[in-house]
Amino acid sequence: MVIKMRKARKARYSGIGGQAVLEGVMMKNKDTYAVAVRKPDGEIEVTTEEFEGILPGNALKKTPFVRGTFNFIDSLVLGMKALTFSSSFYEEEGEETKTDKAMNKLFKDKTEKILMGITITFSIVMAIAIFMILPYFLSSLLNKFVRNMSLLAIIEGVMRILIFVLYIVAISAMKDIRRVYQYHGAEHKCINCIEKGRPLTVHNVMRSSKQHKRCGTSFMLFVMFVSVVLFFFIRVQNPVLRVVIRIALIPVIAGISYEIIRLAGRSNNIIVRIISAPGMWLQRLTTREPDKDMVEVAIASVEAVFDWKAYLKETFGYEVDDTWLEDVPPEDAEAEEIVAAIDSEKKEV
């Protein structure tokens, strides 16, 4: 093993992001993404594809406070594609239903895309109804008792956040979701491992943090907080118009939230740590400690789209050759000394 080291540095932005899927992890780097899945036979299947999303190359996708909406839609589409791929390994064989036959006959080779579009649209509509409209109607029931509009706006915001947290708590109780949350933890651990300047080995990943400031959970919580602020200052008397405004402001809320989480992923000053803290706390519910098999899947996904050795050399100034062991034994004093040197002057996310 040959390692050329410079003075240890703080965590650095790598540009990669990901998502947990069924028994696997999706990782994306620029326009390339990979999905790694642990198949029922124990083997790891990895697929790599290009994904440019909606409006590829459009200047709007690079415009601050506008790009957030497009990136959010892209993440939904890509997430659904990755989830569809991972679930295909666990679908039970059965006869084609009448609905399937009708859909295939009507849309032919576009059936999968149509179904994906319907699913994403339904998911967005349900999210708006549950997290935006429902809190408004619940708070409006207090109109007879609370005359202060500012207080009502605060109550609506608190209800919105509570509903979101309760939703997270409820789905975390499901067995299948708990395993997805473990893969979610593996995804974060891989990114943290790399961005902390550690070689991407099972040992190093396992000892990295399972929470990350650029997590989708944190983004959604930012959406809740930003909506509270906007709805507090933007008020109209007409109830129907209030609902319309809440729906119309969703792209604005998404745009602002995206810029906040983008800043959080690239900075670690005290202000960023403070505003990121609630999302990091909530990730205690949406991430769980993975086992080594799950970490192996996450590493396979990372390595399919990201050259972490080149990144460590360019960003942290040292090389890791191919003799680096996949798993560093805790009793290996020399290896532990090297890892300790790499970790010096660093703090966990």
Image (cartoon, rainbow, N blue to C red):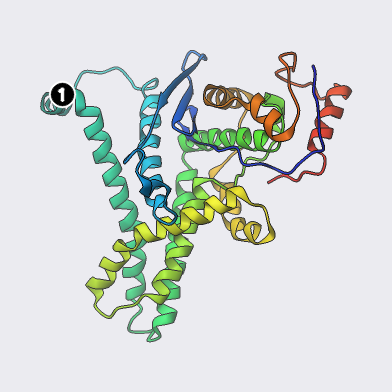
Q: Amino acid at mark 1?
A: Lys
Q: 168 or 80, which is in the foreground?
A: 80
Q: Position of residue 327 (x, y in %)?
A: 72, 20
Q: Is residue 239 visible?
A: yes
Q: Quadrant of residue 298?
A: top right
- Residue at (79%, 34%) from the top-left corner? 342
Q: Is residue 282 left or right of residue 325?
A: left
Q: 166 or 308, which is in the foreground?
A: 308
Query: Where 29 sits versus 271, above or below?
Result: above
User: Residue pushed farthest bottom?
Assistant: 147
Q: Is residue 331 visible?
A: no
- Label 1 sits on residue: 108
Q: Is residue 23 left or right of residue 9?
A: left
Q: Position of residue 279 (x, y in %)?
A: 56, 54
- Residue at (45%, 45%) from the top-left corner? 171
Label 1: which secondary element: helix
Q: Quadrant of residue 157?
A: bottom left
Q: Position of residue 324 (x, y in %)?
A: 74, 17
Q: 173 or 308, which is in the foreground?
A: 308
Crowding near the residue tagged with mark 1, few <14, some 14–19, many ≥20 C-alpha atoms within 10 Å: few
Q: 155 or 300, which is in the foreground?
A: 300
Q: Is residue 115 left or right of residue 64?
A: left
